[in-house]
Image (cartoon, helix red, strand yellow):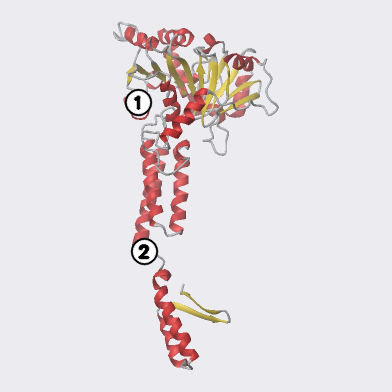
Amino acid sequence: MGAAPRPRVLAIMGSGETSPTMVTVHKTLATRLGSGDHSAVLLDTPYAFQENAADISARAQAYFDRSVGLNVAVVSDADRPAEQNPAAVAAIAAIRTSDWVFAGPGSPSYALNRWRGGPVASALAERIAAGTGVTVIASAAAAAIGVRAVPVYEIYKVGADPHWLDGLDLLSVIGLKVVVIPHYDNAEGGTHDTRFCYLGERRLSMLEAELPSDVAVLGVDEHTALVFDLQAGQAEVLGRGGATVRRSGVSTVLPAGSVLSLADLRSLTLGTSPASPAGGRAAVPGPAQRATEAAAADAGVADAGGTVPSGQPGLDSLELPEITQVLQDRFAAAETERSSAAMVAAVLDLESAIEAWATDTDENDNSERARAVLRGLVTRLGQAADRGLADPAERLGPAVDALLDLRARLRQDGSYAAADGIRDALTAAGIEVRDSPEGTRWSLAS
């Protein structure tokens, strides 16, 4: 029996490409390759300018090894001439022929400066157009692959006027003339609009007006993948968010689980396919989504290398700040209920979540914030141990109730002085006794 044909899959991820939230999606994509060992490469160019580039590569390699089961080699300087990088020819060949190719975090404009018009862009375009294997393009690299690209750092961080850069235009080979906007549903701004890869509606509208009439915006939400099965001619949305096709400010949203033909997606980008009355298309579970759900059912919540908080359904789909808040609230509720076991469980689950997110290459202070909360919870746990968690009233109850029963009998017998003596002794011990027509009640004095 001959070997199964290799897949031809392209996945565009909006963010979270090395976070626990995307492990199941990565595993689903890796499953397409079949059993056995697979050649896998990571292109470090988008973040190669950073002083911690080696650390980012190491974290990504650890993530894919531990959580996905892929032994990933790092490809550097594939765009350099052979006299500058003797390994460049082999690196370009690896991009064309490897079972799995990944490019993700960093700067879109830096990646474009290095790749545009060069051998890396050509190799990626050939791979998407007619190659085989799985190609994963995420976050910063994803922003670079359309007809135009957003220089997000220059606009959002430096204050440059909104403008487009010429993109790699890798998706035209499958009939999509689009600009790709990752981080489409970003909400980090809180009081200001950071959707659309930190542009917000005002700046996106300005840029959208400058696009050619046949070019649409293709947005991919955070912790979400738009997966193209290029052999089947099908697109599917996986993850916690959705994908959006936007033309002239009008959006068609494809929620997680949506599956449609590549031809229908092309029609949406050209404005020749009518949207549903709700502005979106119905979610129709496709084969990859069903595989994702099956993998999640088999693996439970320990998908991220076994480090997702155990026994906490649903936390594996949350980002670290959300997990931190949930477990902080859970600790507070346990503290109110004086449940030391539940308090300890919340602390341990938060520690596990921080460990699970340790390989995330997205550069933010989420881990530091979570660790600060963890230290605070441990301190509160120690303080609770010092003062004792058990309710003193529960410990004193049997003795106090017995004394009050004795007091009641003494009063029935007319021994009021002795009964008052018991009450006085309880009051001196910090116990308030209240007599009423309904009976006698007691409580600890405040």
Circle 1: residue type: Gly
Q: Which mark is residue 69?
A: 1
Look at 45% across and 34% down and name the residue there.
297
**Among the two numbered marks 2 and 1 on one chain, the one whose residue lies closer to the N terminus:** 1
Q: Position of residue 101 (x, y in %)?
A: 40, 17
Q: Would residue 164 be visible to someone looking at this image?
A: no
Question: Residue drawn at (41%, 66%), measured in percent from left and top?
Answer: 391
How many neighbours does mark 2 have within 10 angstroms: few (below 14), some (14-19), or many (20 or more)? few
- Helix or strand or loop: what does disc 1 sit on? loop
Residue 42 % position (x, y): 37, 19
Query: In this picture, is 311 found above or below 52?
Result: below
Q: Circle 2 — which element?
A: helix
Looking at the image, is 44 positioned above or below residue 408?
above
Quadrant location of the N terminus in the rendered image: top left
Q: Nearer the viewer, residue 65 or 83?
A: 65
Marks 2,1: beta carbons within 8 A: no
- Using residue 40 as the reference point, say whether residue 16 is left or right of it: right
Q: Is residue 239 above or below residue 32?
A: below
- Give the percent coordinates (x, y) of residue 160: 53, 23
Classed neighbour count for the residue bearing mark 1: other residues with Cα under 10 Å, few (<14), some (14–19), many (≥20): some
Looking at the picture, tell me which residue is in the foreground, 162 or 108.
108
Give the alpha-carbon distance from disc 2 to disc 1, as whole Å. 47 Å
In the image, farthest residue toward the front: 1
Residue tagged by mark 2? 387
Q: Position of residue 143 (x, y in %)?
A: 50, 20
Q: Is residue 199 left or right of residue 374?
A: right
- To which quarter of the image does residue 81 belong? top left
Q: Is residue 383 visible?
A: yes
